[in-house]
Image (cartoon, rainbow, N blue to C red):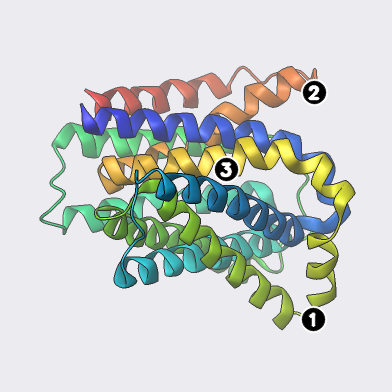
Amino acid sequence: MTEQLGNGAAIVSCFLWAFSILMFQPLLKRHGAPGCNLFKSCLAGALFTVTSAILLVLDRAELPGVGNSVMLLLSGFVGMAVGDFAFFAAIVRIGARQATLIHATSPVFLLVFSIFNPDETLLTREVIGVLLVVLGVMDVTRRQRFKEPSTAKDMSSGALLALVAALSQAIGIILAKEALEQSHPVLGANVRLFGAAAGMLLIMASMGRAQRAREVLVDLDFLKAGFLAVFFGTYLGIGTMMLAIGLGKTAIIGALLSLTPVFLVPMAAFMEKTRLDWRIFAGTVVAVAGVVLVSL
């Protein structure tokens, strides 16, 4: 029952992420993807800090130990800061479609980790389910309409960056899983976001974008416009994600957390009143079949 609850939390997290992505789309032009990611991490971190303080005062949670805090900070730094930077850099070089397809292989890294991890034995049907989810998500992604770059001269570096992003996400989940065995998911999410925000600040500063980072953090109009997107997608989304990681098997949760495109495509078609490519349902059916297998 505990694992099923974790699986459900992962699916809810993907739904929230998909919804927030659509809410953030019109805001990306203001500060770009790196600025928006920094804004999301800092604002959600502040919301988690308030929530954590309430839980501590009510004696419903304890502060993570030093070792677990370090793992959570590294999880945010590697999984969110480095992973997001590599992913967006890959999109610039090879386009959103190819970058997302390669990034969707992240659960495969987690599957390999779980196979060699004696604490997380996977049944045959669970392995098949994870692979079906990955294949289904990749098929849905393949059929999405993206604006692609005019040339593919950066294909090798872009593909490598997308793989780095996929591996970084997998490592972030593994580190969080280890720490959440002895940490409250809310306080764990709080520490992880601190690691992510610190990493994004360092990356932006190293790229000469320190002024842009300051502009993001003091932009009150942006705060008003993006608050709901952060609340649903980052605060609630990462909260349910951390709950899922803490309760479920690493490879299964990693696969379920990759389902965002399955929710995003029909949501975008509905909200933007555009025509839906019905061929995506083939991939959706495959992904759903995988979800059923890992949830039995």
Q: Which residue is mark 2?
A: 272
Mark 1 or 2, closer to the camera: 1
Q: In the structure shown, which secondary structural element does the residue marked by tag 1 occupy?
A: loop
Q: Report x, y in % for residue 38.
A: 69, 60
Quadrant for the N terminus in the image: top left
Q: Which residue is mark 3?
A: 235
Identify the mark nearer the N-term, 1 or 2.
1
Q: Which residue is mark 1?
A: 208
- Residue 100 relative to residue 293: left or right: right
- Residue 181 relative to residue 209: left or right: left
Q: In the structure shown, which secondary structural element does the residue marked by tag 3 occupy?
A: helix
Amino acid at pointer 2: Glu
The correct choice, above or below, for 183 with respect to 136 in the image is below
Neighbor class of circle 1 (other Cα within 10 Å; few <14, some 14-19, many 20+) is few
Neighbor class of circle 3 (other Cα within 10 Å; few <14, some 14-19, many 20+) is many
Residue drawn at 25 percent across, 58 percent down: 113
Amino acid at pointer 3: Tyr
